[in-house]
Amino acid sequence: MSYSNIILIILISLLNTKPNPNIETTINFSEYTFNTTRGNQTSLTLEDNKIYILDFWYLECPPCVKDHGVIAEYLKTTKHKNIEIIGISIDRSKSKWITYLDTHQYNWTNYNEDRSGKILYKDLDIEFFPTYLVVNSKGKILQKSNRFQKALNFIESANLQTQ
């Protein structure tokens, strides 16, 4: 990859990240269906008094996979009972997605975007991956970033325990 392509990717990524996020969007999760690793379909139900980090990713995305290592370490070392991470893969091949999760032993909730109805990442205009959304228990998007650590920093700086 050439130096100019790397710079272009970085600039595009920065444009997709809102430095002072004040997003006025609430997601109605009942409008969306997701595939589970067991082959079922489900919609997301958010629990009261929790903060969620939604991780939009796909298998062939090196920054996504790299951040998954950060997520795994976070889950090992941090008390996070009021913060839940939910991976949402946009991969078209469910079997490759399931095999990948099994092989890498991801121990956080992961779903695959069901493409038969409304598609969440498209409705949210997510074009760059990974994308992390910090969401409260009502589905309101509080912050958007392209790095897991930025999502965690936002939660800490905003002093979000539960809302």
Image (spheres, rainbow, N blue to C red):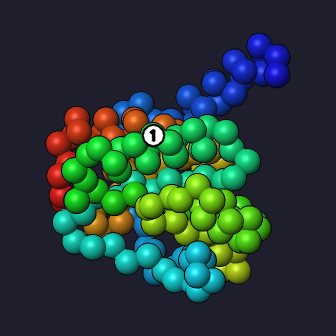
Give the left or right position of residue 6, taking residue 56 as reference: right
In the foreground, 37 or 147: 37
Give the farthest residue toward the top.
Answer: 3
The quadrant of the picture occupied by the N terminus is top right
Give the left or right position of residue 80, taking residue 18 as reference: left
Q: Position of residue 125 (x, y in %)?
A: 60, 53
Looking at the image, residue 149 lies above or below residue 35 = above
Q: Position of residue 55 (x, y in %)?
A: 50, 53
Give the residue displayed 43% in from the left and 48% down from the top: 72
Q: Residues within 10 Å of mark 1 (few under 14, many from 20)?
A: some
Q: Position of residue 60 (x, y in %)?
A: 73, 48
Residue type at numbered disc 1: Val
The quadrant of the picture occupied by the C terminus is bottom left
Looking at the image, residue 73 lies above or below residue 32 = above
- In which quadrant of the rendered view does residue 14 lie? top right
Give the residue displayed 45% in from the left and 57% down from the top: 54
Give the residue displayed 66% in from the left and 53% down from the top: 58
Give the residue displayed 61% in from the left and 37% down from the top: 63
Give the left or right position of residue 144, taking residue 81 as reference: right
Residue of label 1:
70
Looking at the image, residue 153 lies above or below residue 48 = above
Q: Position of residue 85 (x, y in %)?
A: 40, 57
Q: Secondary structure at mark 1?
A: helix
The answer to whether one can see residue 143 in this image is: yes
The answer to whether one can see residue 123 in this image is: no
Give the farthest residue toward the right.
Answer: 2
